[in-house]
Image (cartoon, helix red, strand yellow):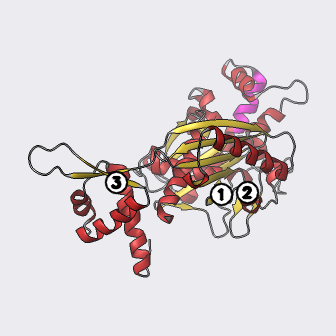
C-alpha cells in the first residue's frame, strides 16, 4: 500500500491494528505495540476509536496478583455481511456475521431473464430476512456480489456472462436502488475464488497461483506476486475464450474453437442432447463405468482443457493450480488424466510443473469465498 499523507497513514494503522486484534484476539495493547512496532500512543488512540465505533471490546483478564491486565477482542457478532452469488438459473443469498458465522442461506430461482424483476425479488427477500432476524440496516456493513463473466467496475457493466440476464447490465446501479444502506462490492466469481484460496485456504503460502472454475462456462482467477491480477481492462482470466481449436461452434464472445465450447459442463451435456438428455452427473457416472461415448466426450474435453492449462502454465508460471467445481466428481481420475496430458507439453524443467489441487465444491464455498473477499475489503475501507 502506497501511503501519501498522514490521513492515509492513520487509515493504514487502523487497518493493521484491527486485523491483528481479529487474528490474535484476545490481545493487549502492549502486545499490539510490540508486534506492530507502533508507539503505545498511536495504539491507544486508534484502539479508543475502534471501541467507540463498537468494533472492539475491552475486558479484564484474571489477575494473578496486582492490577488485572486489559485485553482487546473484535466485536463481530452483531454486525453483518450479505452475499449474493449470481448464476444462470439461480441466485444464492447468504447472511454472515463478522465472526464468519453463516446465519442464513437460501436460493432464488431465476424464472425469467429480466434483471429488474430479479432485483425486486432480492429486495423483498432481504426485507423479510431483516425482519425475521431482527437486524437493523445500520448493522449491515457491506454486501458482496459474485457474477459469472467480466465486471467492468469503471463502467458498471457486465459482459461475456453465462447468465444472459446479466449481459450488458449496470448491476451496481440497479442493486443500489434497492440496497442503499451499505457499500456494495461486485467481482467476477473466479477472482473471488482465487482470492479466497490464496488468502484463507492456503494462508498466503504461495505468491503465484491460479484458480480455474469449470461450470456452464470456464473462468480463472489469477494471483501474481500476492496480488489479484485482472489485467489492464479487467478482462484477465477469461480462460474459456482461449482458442484451442481452429474451428467449432460459435461462442458468446463471437469466436470459434473456444475452450468453453469444448470443455465446459454445458458443452459436455450438449453432446448428448441430440438423442437422449444426460446430466453431467450421469455422464461422469458413464465415464467412470467405461461407457464408450461418455469416455470419448470426456477425454476430448480433457485434451483441450489440458492444452489450455499448459498455455496458462507457460504464460504465468504458477506455483499451484486449483481446479474447482465439477472436477471432484471424477474421484481423482481427472487429475491423473490432466497430468498425463500436461506431460506432453513443453515445460523447461519437470520440477517446475505446478501442483494441481482438486477443490471440492461444498455447498457454502462461494458464500465463504465472497464473505472473505468483502470482509478483507471492508477492513481496509473503514
Q: Residues within 10 Å of mark 1 (few under 14, many from 20)?
A: many
Residue closest to the eye, 292 or 105: 105
Q: Residue tagged by mark 2?
A: 175
Please tell me which residue is depicted at 63% across the width and 28% down the height of the picture. 329
Could you say which quadrant of the image residue 281 lies in?
top right
Can residue 320 be seen from the camera position used here? no
First along the sequence among labels 2 and 3: 3
Which mark is first along the chain, 2 or 1?
2
List the residue tagged with mark 3: 21
Q: Are there few (<14), some (14-19), or many (20+) residues within 10 Å of tag 2?
A: some
Along the line of sight, the residue nearer the viewer: 180 or 99: 180
Q: Position of residue 38 (x, y in %)?
A: 26, 68
Q: Which residue is found at the position 61% from the left and 62% from the top?
A: 230
| Residue 164: % across, % down | 83, 49
Marks 1/2 in contact by CB < 8 Å: the verdict is: yes
Give the labeled residue for mark 1: 186
Provide the residue span drawn in magenta.
292-301
Image location of residue 21, percent across then percent down:
34, 54
The Cα atoms of the two marked residues, 1 and 3, are separated by 27 Å
- Whether the magenta-drawn stretch holds residue 294 is answered as yes
Q: Nearer the viewer, mark 1 or mark 3?
A: 3
Label 2 – label 3 distance at C-alpha: 33 Å
For marks 1 and 3, the one nearer the N-term is: 3
Residue lying furthest top: 289
* Label 3: how many Cα within 10 Å (few below 14, some 14–19, many 20+): many
Q: Is residue 11 left or right of residue 42?
A: right
> Which residue extends farthest right?
274
Q: Is residue 94 visible?
A: yes
Q: Quadrant of residue 338?
A: top right
State how far apart marks 1 and 2 are (Cα). Answer: 10 Å
Secondary structure beneath label 3 = helix
Q: Quadrant of the N terminus?
A: bottom left
Amino acid at each position: 500500500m502506497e501511503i501519501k499523507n498522514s490521513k492515509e497513514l492513520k487509515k493504514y494503522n487502523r487497518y493493521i491494528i484491527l486485523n491483528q486484534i481479529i487474528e490474535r484476539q484476545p490481545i493487549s495493547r502492549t502486545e499490539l505495540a510490540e508486534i506492530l512496532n507502533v508507539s503505545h500512543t498511536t495504539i491507544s488512540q486508534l484502539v479508543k476509536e475502534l471501541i467507540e465505533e463498537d468494533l472492539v471490546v475491552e475486558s479484564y483478564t484474571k489477575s494473578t496478583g496486582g492490577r488485572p491486565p486489559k485485553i482487546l477482542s473484535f466485536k463481530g457478532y452483531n454486525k453483518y455481511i450479505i452475499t449474493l452469488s449470481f448464476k444462470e438459473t439461480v441466485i444464492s443469498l447468504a447472511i454472515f456475521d463478522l465472526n464468519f458465522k453463516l446465519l442464513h442461506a437460501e436460493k432464488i430461482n431465476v424464472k425469467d431473464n429480466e434483471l429488474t424483476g430479479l432485483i425486486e425479488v432480492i429486495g423483498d427477500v432481504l426485507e423479510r430476512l431483516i425482519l425475521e432476524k431482527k437486524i437493523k440496516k445500520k448493522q449491515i456493513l457491506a454486501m458482496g456480489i459474485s457474477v459469472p463473466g467480466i465486471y467492468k467496475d469503471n463502467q458498471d457493466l457486465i459482459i461475456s456472462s453465462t447468465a444472459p440476464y446479466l449481459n450488458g447490465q449496470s448491476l451496481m446501479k440497479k442493486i443500489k436502488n434497492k440496497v442503499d444502506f451499505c457499500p456494495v462490492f461486485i467481482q467476477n466469481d473466479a477472482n473471488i475464488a482465487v482470492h479466497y484460496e490464496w488468502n484463507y485456504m492456503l494462508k498466503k503460502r504461495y505468491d503465484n497461483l491460479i484458480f480455474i472454475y469449470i461450470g456452464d462456462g470456464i473462468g480463472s482467477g489469477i494471483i501474481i506476486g500476492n496480488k489479484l491480477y485482472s489485467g489492464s481492462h479487467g478482462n484477465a482470466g477469461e480462460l474459456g475464450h482461449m482458442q484451442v481449436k481452429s474451428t467449432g461452434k460459435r461462442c458468446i464472445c463471437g469466436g470459434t474453437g473456444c475452450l468453453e465450447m469444448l470443455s465446459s459442463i454445458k458443452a459436455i451435456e450438449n453432446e448428448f442432447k441430440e438423442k437422449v438428455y444426460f446430466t453431467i452427473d450421469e455422464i461422469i457416472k458413464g465415464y467412470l463405468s467405461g461407457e464408450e461415448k461418455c469416455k470419448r466426450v470426456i477425454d476430448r474435453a480433457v485434451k483441450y482443457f489440458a492444452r489450455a492449462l499448459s498455455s496458462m502454465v507457460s504464460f504465468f508460471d504458477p506455483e499451484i493450480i486449483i481446479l474447482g467445481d465439477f472436477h471432484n466428481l471424477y474421484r481423482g481420475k481427472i487429475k491423473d488424466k490432466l497430468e498425463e496430458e500436461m506431460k506432453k507439453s513443453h515445460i523447461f524443467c519437470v520440477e517446475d510443473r505446478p501442483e494441481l489441487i482438486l477443490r471440492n465444491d461444498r455447498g457454502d464455498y462461494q458464500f465463504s469465498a465472497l464473505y472473505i473477499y468483502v470482509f478483507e475489503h471492508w477492513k481496509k475501507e473503514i
